[in-house]
Amino acid sequence: MSNLSSFMNQWVYTDTVKDHFMNPKNLWRKEENFEPDGVGEVGSLACGDQMRVGIKVKDDRISDLRWLTYGCASAIASTSMMSEMAIGMTLEEAYHLTPNMITDALGGLPEHKFHCSVLGDKALRAAIDDYLARQGRENPFKKKVAKIICECKGVTDQQIEDLVKTDKAKTLEDLRQLTGYGTGCGKCKAEVAEYFDEMKHIYAK
Amino acid sequence: MDNRIVYLDNNATTQMAPEVTEIVERSSDLYGNASSMHDFGRKAYAGIDWSRKELAALIDASPDEVIFNSGASEGNNTVFNIARDLIDGGSARNRVVTTTIEHPSIIETVKFLKRRGYRIDEAPVDITGRLDMDKFRALLGPDVLLVSVMTGNNETGTIQPIAEVTRLAHEAGALMHTDATQAIGKIPVTAHTWGVDYLTLSGHKFYGPKGVGALYVRSGAPFEPFVNGGHQEGGRRAGTYNTVAIIGMGKAAELARLTQQDEHDRLWAMREKLRKGLEERIDNIVVNGHPVECLPGTLNVSFPSAEGESILLYLDMSGIAVSTGSACATGSLEPSYVLLASGLDVELAHGSIRFSFGRFNTDADVDYVLEKLPPIIERLREMSTR
């Protein structure tokens, strides 16, 4: 159990984080009757953070966005910051938004709080996926953001994310059997394991 | 109501009592090494002697059974080191029984010893945090060397039946240790009456200085020093006496002994006022721990759909200091192991807040929290996905 004094010593939030935490922007209020063109939800209450993002799209640009977050101050602030950054972006730009871009805009987060900021962009991407699916359109952005982690077997971060998201890879062993990662030179193992844990944290039901 | 500063994290640590601060300041003249034979040393030793008697009176022990050290973490490590030493020495009894909800200074020591092959079992607790006595009994046997069960839990406040646990441990022929750190000054802590062999405590949990504590070792109980290298404490704990801190803790012990019953009633009244007030003002809350067998100043509450770290930080902005069992506040991905071990749903553990009252809190503090907290929970729930 942590206490107030450990907060003061170990991680001091920037003023920007504090502002977004105290006065979240583009919050999804019930009374507003916001009608999104696409909705994405990631994370789980059991994991300690969950986000839902709704977007309105006009001419392939995000014209408006609303969000809800169950989570800590970092999670709330990074969703709020993400919302400000994403509005006005083209779908392609929004799809390329990364946790780093969000935390940079927040003036940084303490290192061990970084994992609290990785949900915002995933929820946004899920909302764009949903929007394109509703339109019956192919997703032209997916491949572009994929990064190869296991060079020997050509396994990408996107692939790992999808396999975890769809519950096909419940364990690292499942993932190895499905993709063959780490069975060549083996140097990717630590990175895959780390990324897998992160994805499990985000998508675990 | 005007803004105020409300410190409700007294289970983490306490502010020194004014009487303690005063004696600490006066004791700064006692800079002689208490082990020296000259006048400077003798005066310092007299102060330590007085403090030892105060500690002994507080915990129902003899002065020579009190060993001064740096605090309960050291005390707990010392006790487990005694068990380890006996096992290494070929003791026929070579198993330790403890619980799933001990302080990290025991939980981590247990993990360390298990990695090295020592046999240690953790008895489970029920949803109120009370030891499951049937399962505990089933773990006892002729191979058990040491039983270690905390008196009162730091997170939930749940109190264990130490006299009963000690009786069972002794019936099985085992030594008995209790970590009484959170209980001191709040409920009677009675080493002789309970019959325990070892008992640990820290000065800073009952308005004494930080970095000082005491270990009770029953006269005749096996002992092995954890810190070697000096003749202090009868060769039981090396290191130059921290005279000022020890005297400060002695004063705190005297205050605790004189005020314990009144403090108990006052803390419990504030705790209950807060519990009832929160239940009246906020829908859907869960009070954790035992409803009656609970340290008087501790209230642990879960707020579904509101996350603990966010609650803590909003309260902090209002000048209220509490702690949380949320994972986000610990830097790990796992929330409070104490709440999880009690069988609490993981989401409820993430949304848990511990309020811990102390000597300097008043009813006005409770009113202030009751004014500030409901809108914070409402706001976070509006923000939440569920």
Image: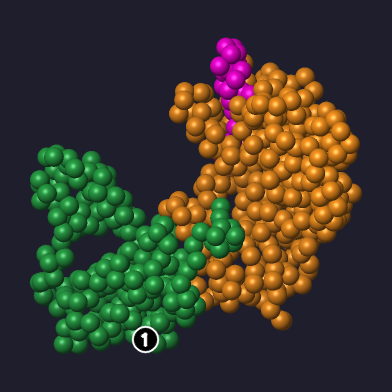
Chain colours: A green, B orange
Q: Nearer the viewer, residue A191 or B40?
A: B40
Q: Which residues are magenta?
A: B82-101
Q: Nearer the viewer, residue B223 or A94?
A: B223
Relative to B111, residue B312 above or below: below
Quadrant including the C terminus of chain A: bottom left
B174 relative position to B313: left or right: right
SS class, disc 1: loop
Q: Residue B193, percent across and down?
A: 83, 31
Indicate the quadrant where residue B64 lies. top right
Label 1 belongs to which residue? A33
Indicate the quadrant where residue A125 lies. bottom left
B39 relative position to A135: left or right: right
Check the image and name the residue furthest to the front.
Answer: B38
Chain letter for mark 1, please.
Answer: A
Magenta segment includes B302: no
What's the residue type where badge 1 is placed? Asn
The residue located at (68%, 18%) in the rendering is: B173
Q: How busy is the neighbourhood of tag 1: few (under 14 within 10 Å), some, or many (20 plus)?
A: few
A127 relative position to B203: left or right: left
Q: Residue B101, percent across and down?
A: 58, 42
Magenta segment includes B85: yes
Q: Residue B140, percent across and down?
A: 61, 23
B379 relative position to B236: left or right: left
The residue located at (55%, 60%) in the rendering is: A9
| Residue B289 appears in view | no
Indicate the quadrant where residue B320 lies. bottom right
Q: Nearer the viewer, residue B324 or A52?
A: B324
The residue located at (74%, 25%) in the rendering is: B231
Relative to B267, residue A153 above or below: above
Relative to B79, residue A34 above or below: below
The residue located at (40%, 59%) in the rendering is: A111
